[in-house]
Image (cartoon, grey):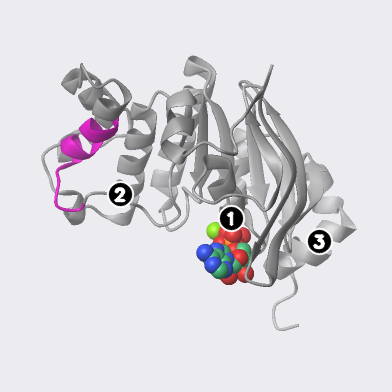
Amino acid sequence: MTLLEVRDLYKSFGGNRVMEGVSFSLEEGEVLGIVGPNGSGKTTLMNVISGILREDRGEVLFQGKKVSSLRPSSRARMGMSRTFQITRLFGNLTVLENVLIPLHYGSPLKADRNLAEELIDAVGLSHKTHDMADSLSLAQRKRLELARALALKPKLLLLDEVFAGLNPVSVREIVELLKRLNEERGITLLLVEHVLKALFQLTRRVLVLSEGKLIFDGSPEEMAKDPVVVKAYLGERYGRKGS
Ligand SMILES: Nc1ncnc2c1ncn2[C@@H]1O[C@H](COP(=O)(O)OP(=O)(O)O)[C@@H](O)[C@H]1O
Ligand SMILES: [Mg+2]
């Protein structure tokens, strides 16, 4: 079944068009990566899908329903949750409290401390349960964001550069965690990512965005050989030093 469908999305800021005719769909249980140069519109796309921004044209369908007029909170209730490139936590609350908030929100009558603790454990933060979010390292803040997103019991998890700035050990642990979430809980994953090595451990399908347009949809191997992708994206990353 198609879980997410994005149809011909356009978005401009002022006169600056940053998304142009973006269409793709995502099947239930799939893992999809989105890559592209800085400023190519990846975060904007995540914002439009999750409802933080409204598209100028086109539409987003989740489980076959048009969600364009729905707020982020309504989309979250339908099973869409996300993490942010720049983490958005309650710094002066503890790790546990940060996870209890979305839990409480999801099912107002039974804020479930056990489930919160289970999620905190799943992301490897149980030793920090009662620490303030402000005191966490970047890697720990990202883990906490993941636990908060999971508290909403998502069908679709949108991850915006979840590996950025993490050391190799944390990257490996988060890759394993995401694999488990996908394989054991059937959570569909959409990852915007620059850390290609980690991304390719999770998925065989990658989209490339360049200047707001989708220029590629295929496997990592095909992507590496695609001249348009090499020119627009990979050249920037793997081009000869000094040239
Ligand atoms: N809220 C905003 N207002 C104005 N311009 C924005 C806004 N958000 C993003 N942009 C612009 O849109 C373009 C795409 O940004 P973004 O989606 O953040 O790219 P990416 O995540 O791929 O680096 C950039 O040129 C950026 O400056
Ligand atoms: Mg971004």
Instruction: Check disc 3: other Cα within 10 Å, few if <14, some if 14-19, many if 20+.
Output: some
Quadrant in which the N terminus appears: top right
Q: Residue at x 88, y 59 (%)?
A: 227
Corner quadrant of residue 104? top left
> Which residue in the protein does label 1 denote?
44
> For disc 3, does the CB lie below 8 Å from ligand 1?
no
> For disc 1, does the CB lie below 8 Å from ligand 1?
yes
Q: Please state the extent of the stretch shown in magenta in the rendering.
A: 91-102
As shown in the figure, which amino acid type bears the numbered disc 2? Answer: Arg
Label 2 close to label 1 by CB (< 8 Å)? no
Q: Quadrant of ligand 2?
A: bottom right
Viewer-nearest of labels 2 and 3? Answer: 2
SS under mark 3:
helix
> Which residue in the protein does label 2 denote?
141
Task: Give how far across and how far down residue 48 sits, in percent.
Answer: 58, 47
> Which residue in the protein does label 3 denote?
230
